[in-house]
Image: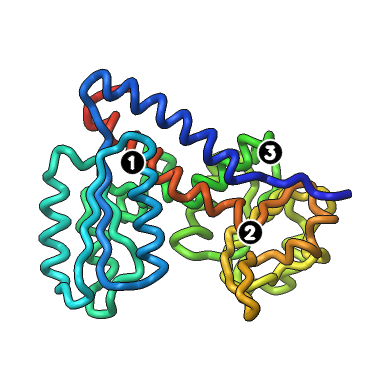
Amino acid sequence: MSARIIDGKRISEEIREEIKQEVERLLARDVRPGLAVVLVGEDAASQVYVRNKAKACDDLGFYSEVHRLPASTTQDELLALIDRLNGQASIHGILVQLPLPKHIQEKAVIDAIAVDKDVDGFHPVSVGNLMIGDDALLPCTPSGVIELLKRTGNDPAGKHAVVIGRSNIVGKPVSMLLLRENATVTMTHSRTPNLPEVARQADILVVAVGVAQLVKRDWVKPGAVVVDVGMNRLDNGKLCGDVDYDDVAPVAGWITPVPGGVGPMTITMLMQNTLKSAKRTHGIA
């Protein structure tokens, strides 16, 4: 057996084409989705992410603003900018790039973003709506995972999904989304006894722990779908995931590569959330 590759780049491009067509229809009604991205400081990786988000907006016909603030920006100054963007009609989504400088409280910033513009899906109200199954702007990477599964015919309904990792950004929300899709979900983490044994029970194995090549072939049930959310850099400079791809691919039924699997989906789902917010704001079904 050799796993079929879940091509996140191709699926992402598919979704972006759908978004682009929908934006064209909105523009005909004089509605243009708008995204504001705020970057505080000079973090190199964050600057790359922000550039990619601005390019995605341009490619899809969105209105976009990028606010680059010095690392010395105070929390009050950042909150004042968010307050202004909350009230700006041309902006339907606000994203503050993490991590923030240490003197700024991440929770205070997330809480300050208006719920209807919370395109990251991190606001406590958004998280609560996700938990109880109400309509919400969903966290981008977890919702990207669900899209990858659905668009490759791997419907989670009735399957046993095991999630390795319990972060607020991926592990917890992807578990809730899998549950919403009628999977039976086991959430595991670093203190789970016999973790490889639990992982081997999975029809769908989602790995998001930030440990390079942690998951080996003896963690994976033959034919399982393996979704690797990890992104790590080895000593030789090569990128890899939390799954040992070469070891696991001969056993799995489907697998996401790193790079080119989950990664391309995150910004695409951010665009999807901004589009959804714009439609909501203007009462468009």
Instruction: Please identify, in this view, whether the residue under mark 3 or under mark 2 is nearer the observer.
Output: 2
Give the label on residue 58, or none: 1
* Callout 2 amino acid: Val
Q: How far apart are marks 3 and 1 (CA)?
A: 32 Å
Instruction: Please identify, in this view, whether the residue under mark 1 or under mark 2 is nearer the observer.
Output: 1
Going from the N terminus, do you reach mark 3 or mark 1 first? 1
Residue at the location (53% across, 60% down)? 171
Mark 2, secondary structure of its residue: loop
Crowding at label 1, few (<14), some or many (≥20) Cα neighbours within 10 Å?
few
* Residue 231: percent from left, percent from top: 57, 65
* Residue 145: percent from left, percent from top: 56, 47
Residue at the location (63% across, 65% down)? 241
Going from the N terminus, do you reach mark 1 or mark 2 first? 1
Labels 3 and 1 touching (C-beta < 8 A): no
Query: Which residue position is annotated with label 3?
Result: 154
* Residue 274: percent from left, percent from top: 33, 40
Q: In which quarter of the image is residue 33?
A: top left
